[in-house]
Image (cartoon, rainbow, N blue to C red):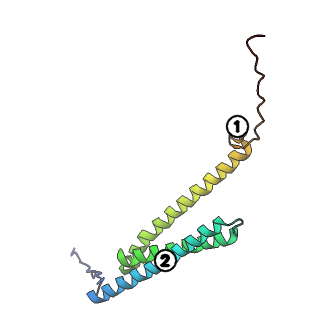
Amino acid sequence: MEHQQVLIPEVTFQHHTDDADFKRRVKKTTILLSVITLIELAIGLTIYTMHKGEHPNAFLVLAFKGVVCILTLAKAYYIVSVFMHLGDEIRNMIMTIIVPLMLFVWFIAAFLIDGNSYRNLRNDYDPHYKQQTTETKAKPVEEPEHKSGKE
């Protein structure tokens, strides 16, 4: 029996075709990340000043926080794509990294939701915990009558 050898072509990629092109890409990404960071700082200062007011608009604060989260995810995408060279990889390599990351994000969200549920149930059904954490009105302390030693 003769052994047949199957030749599979090697998969090779050129990550950077030109040094000048790579430098231009890094410069563009750095400027974009700087602009996104400045926008995040401006939104953060806006939220900070809104909280100093008497009645901050809760919906507007939540919307600003959502925008900051989206901008942070965009920054993470650009950092991983350009500086860590994940954007140059094949699709299977990208999925090998992204799928476990999404599972990790789900894992964190599940624990936060579960912890919040536990806290709410503890506050509702544990009278000992409620007694320790609930504010009570302090009763005024009556001063005792001072007796002199002559009586």
From the viewer's perspective, tell me whether residue 151 is left or right of residue 115.
Answer: right
Where residue 131 sits in the image (x, y, percent)? 72, 39
For disc 2, the marked residue is 38
Q: Is residue 131 above or below residue 27?
A: above
Q: Toward the viewer: 17 or 36?
A: 36
Q: Amino acid at mark 2?
A: Leu
Q: Amino acid at mark 1?
A: His
Rendering quarter of residue 106: bottom right
Residue depicted at 25% across the width and 80% down the height: 7
x, y (%) of residue 107?
A: 53, 59
In the image, 104 versus 43, the foreground residue is 43
- Residue 68 against residue 23 in the figure, above or below: above
Judging by the rendered image, the residue that carries numbered circle 1 is 128
Q: Residue furthest front?
A: 150
User: From the viewer's perspective, is the residue at label 2 or at label 1 nearer?
Assistant: 2
- What residue sits 59% from the left and 72% below the top? 46
Secondary structure state at the residue bearing disc 2: helix
* Foreground pick, 113 / 64: 64
Indicate whether 20 appears above or below 49. below
Question: SS at mark 1?
Answer: helix
